[in-house]
């Protein structure tokens, strides 16, 4: 930080420091000189619009501020919890999670709540994993090796995501302060199989419209859940499969309902996207250049089961990154043709290249509340680099990174080139607080992660690194900033997070984070196969999924928290 009063100090002294109600747009990726400082008629304590540095037309305004902090619809008011006994447990609304104050990086002043000035408020989605459950490249047959290979709830992922959109639209403001929420950002793994169909489902869920979560035969399901294999829950069948032995119900009409059209209202807020390994790589771990896998994805064969020894070898290769180009995977598929099921070919299952990813996000059909491209500009089409900067408010900048490995691996990677770009951007915007977004965490980025964390710790105006990937809530202090990792929306407890940044007026800042569930009721009804009923069932099935981890909610210190830090 340079010496002397900065723009934040001047604005605060004038009584006009505030967060933006609308997004100014994406900054040019390639170091175009910034424009003049934002100007406007803001009011003290109320976020205002800023359009400086905009590369695209500004997005519409967020809803007006609530009269006070709204608690309803968040885990501050209720949390879905299991009830009853038995191997399969129903869910109901349980006791809320209280807010925990964390002071590892700064003390908590007694009067800070009375002095606060809002700087920014937004929502983080991460690891939505919208799943084409009939996709030929899915490896459900590794279920014996890892619970993440196949989940009983996956066919309902679109209904669950739409219900999460409905929850955000119903929020009256930031749950901690009541400030307007300005945008939603996804931190990767928006899709599961790196397929065009899944990407379109995600874009429609976020921007609004009708989604039919079905590929292949428009009249029938062609996956593992009507295969007659005991390995998988066969919901429509009387077969005593392995999951029914654990208490899973028989629900006649489940598959037909799961493939039925779902209508999304679209987010009422502008939204931004960050890429994750499942968005960029087939299977989330194979280099997209493998021609055989690309052709197999759109073809007419699907492998449903595999001898345990073969599955163990394949999982070891995936887990240890021994087959980044998918060559051994391709050979396995060639060798198992006799065991495969015939399915209807579908070009919509084709893998998505970085260029196609950007083109889709910039398609006017999926602009929604904007901004066009949702962070990505025409420059990204030419350069193939999926990192960008955007102005969050008068006093806050956002930086979205691409931590995926295009050469194949589920772990993260940050190139030296991207680090140099971020260093330049942080220096250029040293008068603004910085929020850094990525898919991978500090502990899941073995290549470049240490350098990235060192850069962020050496930059005093960076206040938070916000990410996902691990499917677990975890908040970690790093010297002068907080790393905020949020749980997925496919594994229980299926959460998203609101974040509110405030100036406490006493030399400290606070990041107030609050977890939210989807709008679907906690309690389910097996006869209710409506869109909302399926979203409730999505959550309950995820709780009961065999082998699912039980630590993903994190500790109270990782959930609803106030994170104190010193002003730079």
Image (spheres, helix red, strand yellow):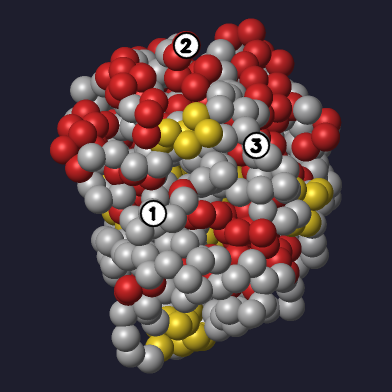
Residue at 49% x, 22% y: name it: 296
Residue drawn at 32 percent across, 65 percent down: 242
Q: Which residue carries the number 2 mark?
A: 291
- Please state the horizontal and vertical placement of residue 435, each as a whole percent of the image: 49, 42
Closer to us: mark 2 or mark 3?
Answer: 3
Query: Is residue 381 placed above or below 217 in the rendered structure?
Result: above
Q: Quadrant of residue 343?
A: top right
Left or right placement of residue 375 versus residue 125 in this view = right
Picture coordinates of residue 138, whole percent (x, y): 44, 37
Considering the image in quadrants, where does the C terminus appear?
top left
Q: Is residue 31 visible?
A: no
What residue sits right under mark 3 in the picture? 216
Q: CA distance from mark 1 to mark 2?
A: 30 Å
Q: Quadrant of residue 412?
A: top left
- Kindly identify which residue carries mark 1: 229
Q: Earlier in the sequence, mark 3 or mark 1?
A: 3
**Front position in the image: 402 or 261:** 261
Query: Crowding near pointer 1: few (<14 within 10 Å), some, many (20+)?
Result: some
Q: Nearer the viewer, mark 3 or mark 1?
A: 1
Secondary structure category for the residue under label 1: loop
* Residue occupying the point 78% across, 37% down: 366
């Amino acid at each position: 930080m340079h010496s002397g009063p900065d723009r934040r100090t001047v604005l605060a002294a004038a009584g006009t420091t505030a967060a933006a109600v609308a997004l100014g747009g994406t900054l040019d990726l390639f170091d175009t000189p910034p424009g003049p400082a934002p100007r406007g008629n803001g009011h003290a304590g109320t976020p205002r619009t800023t359009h400086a540095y905009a590369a695209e037309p500004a997005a519409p305004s967020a809803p007006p501020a609530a009269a006070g902090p709204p608690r309803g619809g968040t885990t501050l008011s209720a949390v879905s919890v299991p009830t009853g006994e038995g191997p399969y447990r129903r869910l109901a609304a349980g006791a809320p999670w209280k807010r925990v104050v964390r002071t590892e990086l700064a003390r908590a002043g007694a009067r800070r709540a009375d002095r606060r000035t809002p700087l920014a408020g937004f929502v983080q989605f991460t690891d939505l994993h919208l799943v084409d459950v009939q996709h030929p490249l899915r490896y459900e047959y590794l279920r014996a090796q890892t619970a993440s290979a196949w989940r009983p709830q996956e066919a309902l992922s679109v209904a669950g995501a739409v219900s999460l959109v409905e929850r955000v639209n119903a929020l009256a403001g930031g749950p901690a302060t009541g400030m307007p929420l300005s945008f939603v950002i996804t931190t990767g793994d928006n899709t599961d199989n790196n397929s065009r169909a899944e990407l379109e489902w995600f874009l429609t869920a976020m921007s609004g419209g009708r989604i039919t979560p079905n590929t292949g035969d428009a009249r029938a399901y062609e996956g593992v859940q009507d295969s007659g294999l005991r390995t998988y829950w066969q919901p429509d069948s009387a077969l005593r499969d392995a999951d029914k032995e654990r208490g899973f119900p028989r629900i006649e009409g489940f598959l037909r309902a799961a493939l039925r059209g779902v209508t999304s209202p679209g987010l009422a807020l502008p939204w931004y996207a960050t890429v994750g390994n499942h968005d960029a790589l087939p299977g989330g771990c194979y280099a997209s250049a493998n021609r055989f896998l690309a052709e197999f994805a759109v073809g007419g064969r699907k492998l449903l089961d595999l001898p345990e020894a073969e599955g163990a070898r394949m999982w070891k290769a995936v887990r240890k990154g021994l087959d980044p180009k998918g060559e051994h995977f391709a050979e396995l598929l060639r060798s198992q043709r006799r065991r495969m099921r015939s399915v209807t070919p579908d070009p919509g299952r084709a893998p998505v290249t970085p260029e196609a990813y950007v083109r889709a996000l910039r398609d006017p059909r999926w602009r929604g509340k904007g901004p066009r491209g949702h962070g990505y500009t025409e420059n990204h089409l030419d350069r193939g680099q999926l990192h960008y900067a955007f102005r969050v408010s008068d006093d806050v900048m956002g930086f979205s990174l691409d931590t995926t490995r295009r050469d194949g691996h589920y772990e993260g990677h940050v190139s030296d080139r991207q680090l140099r770009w971020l260093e330049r951007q942080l220096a250029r915007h040293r008068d603004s607080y910085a929020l850094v977004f990525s898919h991978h965490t500090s502990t899941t980025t073995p290549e470049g992660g240490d350098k990235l964390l060192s850069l962020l710790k050496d930059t005093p105006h960076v206040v938070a690194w916000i990410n996902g990937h691990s499917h677990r809530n975890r908040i970690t202090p790093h010297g002068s900033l907080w790393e905020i990792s949020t749980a997925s929306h496919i594994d229980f407890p299926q959460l998203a997070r609101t974040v509110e940044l405030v100036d406490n007026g006493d030399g400290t800042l606070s990041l107030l984070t609050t977890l939210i569930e989807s709008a679907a009721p906690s309690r389910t009804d097996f006869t209710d196969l409506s869109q909302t009923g399926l979203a409730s069932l999505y959550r309950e099935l995820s709780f009961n999924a065999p082998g699912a981890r039980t630590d993903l909610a994190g500790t109270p210190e990782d959930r609803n928290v106030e994170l104190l830090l010193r002003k730079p």
